[in-house]
Amino acid sequence: MKQRNLWLAAMVLGCVSLSAQDRGHLNIGAAGQNIGDQVIFPNGADFIPSTGWSKDLTFTNGGTYAGFWQGNITLTALATTVANGGPAANAAAPGSFLRAEIVSVTGPVGSSFGFWEKGSKTPTYSIPSGTLDGHFTYDLSDKVLGAGTVGTDPFGHLHGRRFTVDMEGEYTVGFRAFDTSVNGLSGQAIHTPSEILLIGFRGILVPEPSTFGLAFVGATLMSLVWSAKRRSVKKA
């Protein structure tokens, strides 16, 4: 009976760890590489509120983000070249330059959603809950790699940024991505802007167990089960 209970616990934890996927990177590319093709979020369906998932932001009382609930999702402009890990399916056209835009925020009354650029000591943007038509933008493509010049990879994988909230609770944030290059027809962008993607965030005091933590506990239980079985075989 004891072994059976251990097996059941291990199986449950294994299933939970698989379902608690790490959505650490939101990819941005395009529906095609022709002029006029729309910017898209290729894995955006994994992030939408109807999946039941939301990004947990944890409270911190020290350091740069003291007094905020903080965390991150890295928005990644997909690569077209081998040098940057490509060519990726749904990458935007060479010569494009992708940027993100925070369009809307809903959350607790009086709260704000923050975006912090790498190295910033205060929020780069502090966006009040209730914002419905915001234009808070930041780069996704990497200028250092030459993104935005004709024929160049639009890739960008920029770490060190943070999202924050200043009140505990549930938030829904609207993101859009767009091309700001001038390499399309008549000096216009190559791609048209994306649709708005809604993502849930939660300001929480205690984070839920991570995927790694759940997997570790599950593996430990499995090991105990095997040890118990081996001991029972030896006794027989």
Image (tube, grey):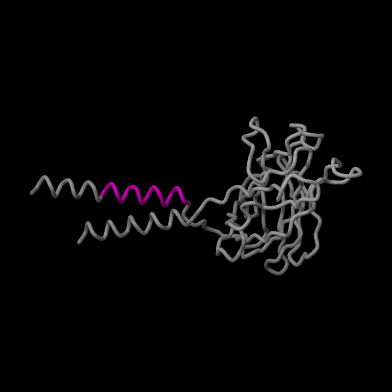
Answer with left or right where residue 129 lies relative to residue 51: right
Number of marks in the image? 0
**Residue furthest toward the front?**
34
Q: Position of residue 71 (x, y in %)?
A: 61, 50
Q: Which residue is most to the bottom?
A: 109
Quarter of the image where one finds residue 107: bottom right
Identify the residue at image location x=67%, y=33%: 81
List the single residue furthest toward the right: 186
- Residue 94 in the image: x percent, y percent? 75, 38
Image position, residue 96 (x, y; %)? 78, 41
- Quarter assignment of residue 118: top right
User: Can residue 212 be found in the magenta stretch?
Assistant: yes
Dominant secondary-structure state across the stretch colored magenta: helix
Identify which residue is drawn at 68% across, 68% down: 108
Closest to the observer: 85 or 217? 85
Q: Nearer the viewer, residue 142 or 123?
A: 142
- Horizontally, is 93 left or right of 219 in the view? right
Can you give x and y, in whole percent of width and height, for residue 6 in the image? 27, 57
Question: Is residue 72 magenta-colored?
Answer: no
Q: Residue furthest top?
A: 83
On-image quarter of the N terminus? bottom left
The magenta segment is 211-224
What residue sits 58% from the left and 48% below the top? 24
